[in-house]
Image (tube, helix red, strand yellow):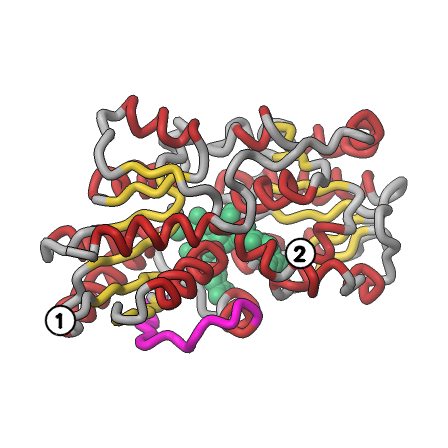
Amino acid sequence: MSARVCFVVGARPNFMKSAPVYRELGALDPSLELTLLHTGQHYDDAMSDVFFRELAMPRPDEFLAVGSGSHAEQTAKALVGVERALRERQIDLCVVAGDVNSTLAGALAAVKLGIPIAHIESGLRSFDRAMPEEHNRVLTDHLSDLLLAHSEEAITNLQREGITSGVHLVGNTMIDSLVALEDRFRGLGACAGHGLEAGSYLLVTLHRPALVDGPLLDAAIAALAAVSESMPVLFPVHPRTRAALGGAAAGLPPGLQLTDPVGYLEFLSLEADARAVLTDSGGIQEEATYLGVPCFTLRDNTERPITVEHGTNRLLGLDPKRIEEVPGLVSEAAGTAPEPPPLWDGHAAERLARVVADRHAC
Ligand code: UD1
Ligand code: UDP
């Protein structure tokens, strides 16, 4: 009988990491029965559906409608829903990606049913236990059978925790999604739709609880307003951040534009044409490195040091005042666009699919 493989996704960054793997696995071994399970952690069109359309992902076989809530509520609802679906569908392998609550719920549901787990983007560590994602990363890796790493440093992290078997260096599947759409977003010129010229503006995304769920967000907006006097700023606002903004979003200078989250193609176009990016996103640090766009990360640490050592990323620290330094730092960064890290080449999902298919050749 053919093996049944279930992909569990739920939040924005899951979609671009999983889509190429789903596609490659289906192409490599058509005898596999693939299921796509969406927990519903993210549910707005701009946080979910748009990615299915633009990444040409099939509609999920099931949508669990877990929605928002505390960590316990969200993870528990996803755990219950995923467990039922894995059992009913008699799944043989569960594939999870990244470090969100849906990732941990998928892995935990699977391991309790004795179903092997493949973890895409295994081995990343910020070494910051105050970050909710760090628990999800550590726990998911310790539950997984196939640990699919995008860099050597991820493998070193796993070895440090005693995880040595089932580890495979495959490369970065999120970059596969970017590469697959490069012909489409390169010519898009999405910045013109926001009244901006390519190469002139700072693209901003900020959504980490450490920044937005406290007093630092207002200070960040004030610093962005100051930057916008010398460099236009475009800030597609994550719903967590929108909810926290309140009055700080009113009376902004004309150079600082806040928009709703944008679709993937539009975002990649905006990113590729930006003068620089300011972010606390994990994935955007990687995309900026691939695109060779200067990236400033408003965090004290990163689980992706390869983007600092090998790419365009620079850690500013969790200090909104430092945002005001960005225009000067961008000038210093001019002309330094290193090669992408090894295996961030658009073919990671092919390598990953081969690892999975080999395991199921039994
Ligand atoms: C989650 C992930 C984070 C990831 C981010 C990507 C966890 C613990 N966190 O954070 O690692 O970087 O996704 O974007 O899994 N909301 C909406 N519409 C939506 C989704 C969310 O309005 O479609 C709002 C709700 O008010 C919700 C808040 O955003 O309470 C936060 O959503 P949640 O999924 O809990 O966490 P994120 O901050 O999105
Ligand atoms: N992204 C997008 N539209 C936006 C902001 C981000 O399509 O308005 C994409 C971005 O290109 C990247 C991914 O979302 O592929 C990153 O997700 P996010 O920052 O939400 O999560 P993180 O990577 O921090 O977990």
Q: Is residue 64 above or below residue 153?
A: below
Residue 307 x %, y %: 58, 32
Q: In this view, does 169 lie above or below 271?
A: above
Q: Where, by quadrant of the figure, is residue 61 drawn?
A: bottom left
Q: Is residue 297 above or below residue 361?
A: above
**Magenta residues, start to end:** 54-68
Query: Mark 1 belongs to which amino acid?
Result: Met
Q: Where, by quadrant of the figure, is residue 30 drawn?
A: bottom left
Report whether the residue tagged 2 is closer than 8 Å to ligand 2: yes
Q: Where, by quadrant of the figure, is residue 189 drawn?
A: bottom right
Q: Rate crowding at label 2 as few (under 14), some (14 to 19) or many (20 or more) other CA atoms within 10 Å.
A: many
Q: Rate crowding at label 1 as few (under 14), some (14 to 19) or many (20 or more) other CA atoms within 10 Å.
A: few
Q: Nearer the viewer, mark 2 or mark 1?
A: 1
**Helix or strand or loop: what does disc 1 sit on?**
loop
Query: Mark 2 belongs to which amino acid?
Result: Leu
Tell me, yes or no, whether the highlighted magenta stretch contains residue 67: yes
Count of picture labels = 2
> Mark 2 — residue?
268
> Mark 1 — residue?
1
Looking at the rendered image, the quarter that the N terminus falls into is bottom left
Circles 2 and 1, Cβ within 8 Å, touching? The answer is no
Residue 325 visible somewhere in the drawing:
no
